[in-house]
Image (tube, grey):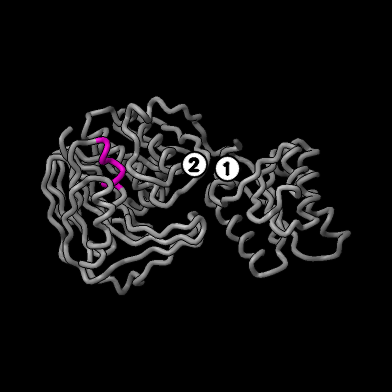
């Protein structure tokens, strides 16, 4: 396939842990991701002149063409960790809304954007609405495509249709003219919904789990393979899922080509339903904050959570101890924050291992000598929150 036009945002991204300070955004990342999959990639995006200048080295590195459309805002996303909800600057209400960008090409990958919209006229279009609040329907701005694939997460699919069940919602989009809908499921892989039925696509294990922009990479590889190389939707989605695993592990672009993706041995994984016991100290603001963040992450991934501070609270030892252990005995895995070497947390780890439960440990500032028994008893030890959470969800 000779060319693909990508229209989507170019934004500044900063993350505290792991450290990340780069310019990508959905459009920029997608263009960079597929530069090794197609002969020519053309990115069109709103960009303030200073942002466009700062983005030039990324364009040169990945080898695509960039056509910036002047905009008064330079938008940034700020994360504490890569599973956290970002802070957007300027706030959404103050972002200037620009005139629509018109795009006409045989193959287009269109993303939703904060500062405007793109009106597409194409033979093939892959549309990712990219909005947690009010995703725009593809044709509402006058866009048209002979063959349309919508790639979106569950929440976006529900919001676009008003239907609570994502598969039913996707099927309603087929009735409105989409040829297929791909429902991105994160740790659960994806679902390809067509008139002929629903096909599951697995997620693939990665040694680390960098998630900022992983959905952009999925949409980009899917567009390159389905619209560009005429792969079946199922094959295109599997290669996209493999591409996400490469990105999550390497934190780098471009994504290796299809032959490399197929040849790389990766185990398919999915969310394992169950209940996680969340062990860790909660006696200071920082300790309580990370427990709350972890609990929200696990609940967001569909796991049940028993958290002593949330489900039992503070109290005398003769009340708290038995209640916590009863909670642990109702769980099928344990996640522990070991920084600070809290005695109660260490006891809970030992109790869980004696029960035969898998134990996942987040230890960012613990000496190797202090980890000896933890490691020797078969616990999985991580220094990155996102990776630890993903492996706990997958039970790997």
Residue furthest right in the image: 318
Numbered mark located on residue 393 in the image: 1
Numbered label attached to residue 187: 2
Cβ atoms at labels 1 and 2 below 8 Å apart: yes
Q: Is residue 376 visible?
A: yes
The region drawn magenta spans: 30-37
Q: Is residue 391 above or below residue 57?
A: above
In the depicted structure, whether residue 369 falls above or below residue 259: below
Q: Residues within 10 Å of mark 1 (few under 14, many from 20)?
A: many
**Front residue of 54 and 187:** 54
The N terminus - image quarter: top left
Locate residue 234, reporting x and y percent.
Answer: 34, 29
Quadrant where the C terminus is found in the figure: top right
Q: How many marks?
A: 2
Callout 2: helix, strand or loop?
Answer: helix
Q: Which residue is at 54% across, 50% downward? A: 386
The reply to whether the magenta stretch includes residue 265 is no
Q: Which mark is residue 226?
A: none
In this picture, is 283 found above or below 166? below
Image coords of residue 121 (percent x, y): 12, 47
Q: Quadrant of residue 248?
A: top left
Q: Quadrant of residue 126?
A: top left
First in residue order: circle 1 vs circle 2: 2
Residue 36 forms part of the magenta stretch = yes
Q: Secondary structure at mark 1?
A: helix
Quarter of the image holding residue 312?
A: bottom right
Q: Is residue 352 left or right of residue 189?
A: right
């Amino acid at each position: 396939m000779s060319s693909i036009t990508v229209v989507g945002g170019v934004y500044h991204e900063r993350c505290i842990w792991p450290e990340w300070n780069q310019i990508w955004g959905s459009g920029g990342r997608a263009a960079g991701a597929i530069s090794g999959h197609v002969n020519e990639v053309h990115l069109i995006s709103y960009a303030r002149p200073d942002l466009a200048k700062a983005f030039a080295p990324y364009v040169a590195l990945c080898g695509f063409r960039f056509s910036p459309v002047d905009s008064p805002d330079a938008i940034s996303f700020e994360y504490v960790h890569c599973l956290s909800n970002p802070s957007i600057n300027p706030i959404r209400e103050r972002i200037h809304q620009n005139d629509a960008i018109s795009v006409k090409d045989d193959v287009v990958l269109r993303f939703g954007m904060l500062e405007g919209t793109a009106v597409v006229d194409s033979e093939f279009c892959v549309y990712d609405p990219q909005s947690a609040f009010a995703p725009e329907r593809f044709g509402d701005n006058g866009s048209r495509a002979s063959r349309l694939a919508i790639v979106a997460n569950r929440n976006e699919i529900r919001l676009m249709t008003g239907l609570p069940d994502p598969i039913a919602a996707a099927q309603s989009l087929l009735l409105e003219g989409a040829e297929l809908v791909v429902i991105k499921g994160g740790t659960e892989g994806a679902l390809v919904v067509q008139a002929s039925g629903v096909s599951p696509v697995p997620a693939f294990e990665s040694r680390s789990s960098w998630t900022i922009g992983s959905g952009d990479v999925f949409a980009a590889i899917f567009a390159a393979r389905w619209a560009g190389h005429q792969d079946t939707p199922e094959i295109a989605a599997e290669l996209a899922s493999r591409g996400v695993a490469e990105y999550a592990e390497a934190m780098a672009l471009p994504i290796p080509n299809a032959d490399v993706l197929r040849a790389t041995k990766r185990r398919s994984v999915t969310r394992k339903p169950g209940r996680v016991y969340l062990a860790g100290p909660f006696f200071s603001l920082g300790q309580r904050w990370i427990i709350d963040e972890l609990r929200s992450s696990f609940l967001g991934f569909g796991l049940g959570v028993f958290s002593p501070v949330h489900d039992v609270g503070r109290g005398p030892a003769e009340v708290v101890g038995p209640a916590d252990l009863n909670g642990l005995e109702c769980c099928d895995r344990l996640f522990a924050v070991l920084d600070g070497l809290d005695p109660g947390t260490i006891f809970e780890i030992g109790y869980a291992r004696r029960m035969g439960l898998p134990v996942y440990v987040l230890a960012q500032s613990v000496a190797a000598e202090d980890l000896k028994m933890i490691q020797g008893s078969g616990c999985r030890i991580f220094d990155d929150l996102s990776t630890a959470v993903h492996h706990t969800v997958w039970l790997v």
